[in-house]
Every structure is written in C-alpha cells, then in structure tokens.
Amino acid sequence: MKEMRNGIRKRSKNSYAIFISLGKDPITGKYNYLWQTVRGTKKEAEKRRTELLHQLDTGMFIKPSKTTFAEYLERWLQDYAKPNISPRGYERYAGIIKKYFIPEMGNIALTQLKPEHIQEHVRTIRDQGLKPETIKFHHAVIHKALQTAVKWGLLYRNAADGVDVPKKSHTERPTWDDFEVRQFLDTAKDSIYYALFHTALFTGMRRSELLALKWADVEIQQIHVCRSLHHLKDRSYIFTQPKSEKSRRTIALSPSSILVLAEHKERQQAIRTMLGETLGKDDLVFSTPQGAPLRPNTITRAWAMQAAKAGVKPIRLHDARHTHASLMLKQGIHPKIVQERLGHATISMTLDIYSHVAPGLQEAAARSFDTLVNPEREKELIEINS
C-alpha cells in the first residue's frame, strides 16, 4: 500500500479533514495516519496541520482523548487540589468549578478546550458584575488545573495562557490610625474577645493563625506561629500547616501585649478551675469557656459590632493586619521587619501591598537626608516657619 502524503481534504462547507502520516506499522506493514477535523476555513485547517506537524517533530503531540473537561476537573480536585490546597482553599476551588466551569465547559473534550472557551467565561462573569479580583481568581483556578494537565502529559499547552482578564483595580486597603486603634481598644476592654482583638492589632496575625494559637506557642516575649484553624462547610474544624515556610514565624510581643495575654490567661484559668479543669499547654489561647475552637464568623461579626460601638470607620478584622503593618512602616520600621512579622513570602510583596504608605515615608526620608547633609538648612526652615 502506497503511503499518502500529509494533506487536507475538504469534507463539507467550512469543514476540512487533516491527515498526517505516522509511518508504517512494523507488524502489519500498513501506514498509520493521524486524522483531525477542523471546522472553519482552509487557512485555519492549514494552520492546524502546521501545528500538528510541529508537535510531532518536537515530541509535544498528545493523542486526542475522549476525556471531557468535567471528568478531568473532578479527577484534578481529588488527585491534586485536595491533598495540596488548604481545606478552605479546596472548598473555594471546588465551588467555582462545580458552579461555573463544569456547567459551561464540562462537555468539551479536554484536548479540545481552547482559549476562546475560557474567554467566553470571563466575558460572561464580567457582564454579571463580578469584580476584577474575582474574575482573576476564576482565571487562576482554571489556569492551575490546566497547568497540572500539561504536567501530567494530558495537554501540550495551557489554553488559559491565551486569555485576557481585567486588570486588578488598585484599591487602598482601609486601615486605622493610632487614634482609632486606641479608641477601638478602649471601647472593647469589656469584650470577651478583647485579648484576641488586641493581639490581632499588635501582631498582624491572620484570623486563622490567631484562632489556632495554643499556650505552648506563647512565650514571655514572643509568639510562635505554627498552624492555622479552618472552619469547613460541614461545620468541622481542621488545623493545617502554615501556607508557606515564611508564614511559620516568630513574632516579638510588645509590653502591652505581654500584659494583655497574661491577664487573659489568668481569667481563662479561673474559668477552667470553676469547671473543674486545668488549663494546659495544648489548650487554645482563644476559645470558648470549655476550650472549644471559636467560630471565625462569630469573631468577625463581634469585631464589626465593636468597631461600630467605638465610632471608628468600619474595617474588616483582616484589616487589623494591614493597620499593624501601616503603622509600623509610618514609624520608620524597616520593611524587612514588617515582612517577617506578617509572614509575607518576599519583601517585594510587603512593599507592593503597602505602597500607599510610601509617599509619607519618602518625604520623611528626604527630610532626614537633607538634615544630615545640610543641617544649617533645617535651622533656616525653622526660622522661616516660626
């Protein structure tokens, strides 16, 4: 049997068949061919044939599979996401996949998924009014899933690479100034969550880290951040390792934090004694009177109510972390120290997040440099302003 040359055949209007020879089968002696149907123009079919030839030459060709995108996503959630992503993160990934991706694109073969399919999803959720940050997260989820498919050898390229997503709008993170912090804490002194709120503002710890803190992690002058606590949709609680190596850190405590935590421990021990129990090192620092974990949403609501009562501008509990960082930077604390206290992976992340603080820091730096090099100029300015 004579070998057919690689080519294109027209099947019907706007439909072409591509065939590429894969060589002679050593057993049967017959020639094997790769066939693909392209719906579109002949130019598009020629472009696809060129792509296939390049993939075959470079070893990047992956034989088309009947596995649907939905089937792959279900496998990816179980085999990759569940063991590698935090429980709360897994719930978010699974929620988006099952609510959006599977209904919209699940019936498409994994190997036939194209950038335009994902771009259509982006356009749809943008028209629905989802925020740019949410749209970027959707894209991050599908990109991660497809990147794993490339790693597993199921795809040769990531279709999400060719998708345009809205740029993340820069919004300055709301924080309190030192007056608002004092006003909030003065009002919250009678709250059962006062020690927790004080620790959040004075350490910059995440809510999940605060709720996972044990007395074994608290020394006289420092706190060791070793784990996080998550409350899942099935109402169970789970402790997890820090999200990154930098998240596992030691935070120095201020004198007021040391005092607040010591008083909190005394009250907690008194309650346990009334219940006929003893407070141990493995007990949670912030818990119910019986020692059970606190519900994250309960703490968040209590924070909002306390802020309203104090008459300060409303900010999220997570913004206590941003308040801590902003106030430290404004005090001239080196960004590297702030990065270590917050547990950011890099100092550039800290500087990017708190870029809104930079103008004031730059002005102060300029004045300090001028005073150092031209001390007489400082005297002139004082005389002019007096």
Image: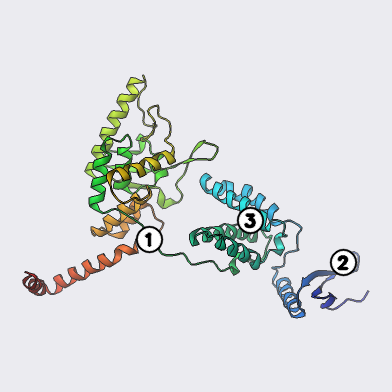
Report the Cα–Cα distance between label 1 and label 3.
30 Å
Instruction: Classify mark 2: helix, strand or loop.
Output: loop
Q: Position of residue 29 (x, y in %)?
A: 91, 68
The answer to whether residue 129 is above or below residue 21 is: above
Instruction: Classify mark 3: helix, strand or loop.
Output: helix
Q: Position of residue 72 (x, y in %)?
A: 68, 54
Q: Residue at x 40, y 29 (%)?
A: 291
Q: Residue furthest top?
A: 276
Q: Residues within 10 Å of mark 2 (few under 14, many from 20)?
A: few
Q: Is residue 212 visible?
A: no
Mark closer to the chain start, 2 or 1 = 2
Single out the mark in the foreground, 3 or 2: 3
Question: In the rendered view of the protein, which quadrant contains the N terminus?
Answer: bottom right
Give yes or no for contact between labels 2 and 1 (Cβ–Cβ under 8 Å).
Answer: no
Give yes or no for contact between labels 3 and 2 (Cβ–Cβ under 8 Å).
Answer: no
Q: Residue at x 26, y 48 (%)?
A: 181
Q: Which residue is mark 1?
A: 353
Q: Which residue is mark 2?
A: 26
Residue 43 vs residue 253, the one in the foreground: 43
The amino acid marked with disc number 2 is: Pro
Q: Position of residue 320 (x, y in %)?
A: 33, 49
Q: Which residue is mark 3?
A: 101
Q: Residue at x 25, y 50 (%)?
A: 180
The amino acid marked with disc number 3 is: Phe
